[in-house]
Image (cartoon, helix red, strand yellow):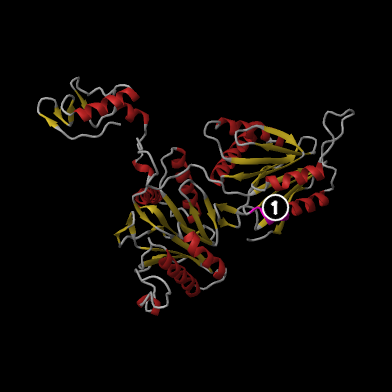
Amino acid sequence: MIPRRVAHNPIIGPGVVPRGVDAEYDAACARDDARDGPATTTHAPASGRAFTLDGKAREKAPTTRTQTPYVTGTSALGLKYGDGVLLACDTLACYGSTKRYKNVERVKKVNERCAIAFTGELSDFTYVCNLLEELTTEDFCEDDGMTRDAEEIYQYLTRVMYNRRNKFDPLWNSLVVAGLKTNGETFLGTVGMIGTHYEDDHVCAGFGNHIARPIFREFYKADMTEEQAVEVMRSALYACVMRDKQMMNKFQICKVTKDGVTISEPFAVPTEWGYEKFYNPTKFSETGW
Amino acid sequence: MAPEGARQHANWSPYDNNGGTVLAVAGENYVICASDTRMSTGYSILTRNYEKVDQMSPKTLMASAGFMADAQTLKKTLKARCKQYEFQNKKPIGCVSFAQMLSNTLYYRRFFPYYAFNIVAGLDAEGKGAVFTYDAVGSYERTNYSCQGSGQALIMPVLDNQLKTVSPLVLPAVSSATPLSEAAAIELIKDCFATAAERDIYTGDRVELWIMNADGVRKEEMPLRLD
């Protein structure tokens, strides 16, 4: 593509670089035309060349802005216990490697027996939340006292994610769905960006799958009490915050039981940085400065 | 137009390989369909409890390895079409008809395929065991044993060695069903999975066997390596 030029010519109009002004630019245009044929933009004036509308390029390529994540959340963890389910994540949304938004609630209550958490693109998650909000409104308007249970929400999200991957325009998220089924059993499942989904006693979306999941595999017991489950969850969060650059030491734990959904106030886990080697990293080193 | 050179941002693929091995063996009056229950991505195990065998109709079992989201969608579509068949024909679909339907459904997506490797196992109209084996775009063949998925290369030659039967071209015709008894076939399948799990990192955790004969369908399980 020819280099983008910003120019204003009062005769031709804004945003057009006339030919014959800049020899180097003309040469670039000629090279481009020789390769791709002349630009087919209908708006291009005869004497110059529109610098933004490359008609052929626009016809060929679909929008790709939606194909990369911009503002992202990292791991989301889920853990079942005796009579409920826990969801946990930090409150950070990153812009690349910048800690951009430090007070984002990454868990959403869907209804009285279901909550979801996400990794990946924040705006895509907002869109998912809007879809769920529509469902909830529908349920409310039915006025029959029925709401969708966690498994139904999970199946719905599975189809949404898979459909968008079929359109080659995925929602850049992994979702963790936690809650209760209609029969009162606990439910915990996860859906990936391309529709991969599974249920398990403990799940992690994102990088936590490498760091927190082994901790869950080690310490999970089906009949854990809430206190024990929270303890396991906190140690998993601790491991994540120590090893995941995108994780921040400010967390929320969401609990779903038959009594409803509660999302905790943000809290931090204690970390220890007072080690001798941290104060004086070269003390025992034989080489280096 | 993307600049030349390395991409600076995350990239995605519409496909993933979630691993797993599926296997089926047909006998004179039984059929066995088995799979492991591991689901992986790359070097990570996602869950140890993903069951790949489904009963699609009273006489039909189906097992799929490959990309799980495609496999699940495929099964969902087929289950709906089995229901429609039942309403239209006042009888559940047979395994031979189902096998053709699966082939058509796969080929319908010839240019954006379901990345799923399927085996259909069932009892045909005569009550004889039948196994159908597929590629991702719908080519299929009726055989009496088959194995698909990540452990295919490890298991298939063993089945060839143990179960090979007389050529269908021989006259007078000899039954193509495996000569093994049901119990012996179950043992062979369990051994096959235990063996594949030793070397294939995508096979493990648990094997489930669905055994179908004139009495109905029953399930057996055996634990596999967890590493």
Q: Is residue A213 placed above or below A157 in the rendered structure?
A: below
Q: Which residue is drawn at 57% across and 57% down?
A: B47
Q: Quadrant of residue B197?
A: bottom right
Q: How crowded is mark 1: few (under 14 residues within 10 Å), some or many (20 or more)?
A: many
Question: Number of numbered discs present?
Answer: 1
Farthest residue to the top: give it: A46
Q: Is residue B110 left or right of residue A178?
A: right
For the point 60% across and 49% down, the residue is B19
Q: Can you identify the residue that label 1 sits on?
A: B196
Establish if A141 lies above or below A104. Answer: above
Q: Does the magenta stretch include residue A29?
A: no
Image spot of residue A264 (x, y percent): 37, 68
Disc 1 is placed on an element classified as helix
Amino acid beneath label 1: Ala
Provide residue A112's location: percent of width, then percent of height: 42, 60
Find the magenta span and give its range.
B194-200
For the N terminus of chain A, the image quarter is: top left
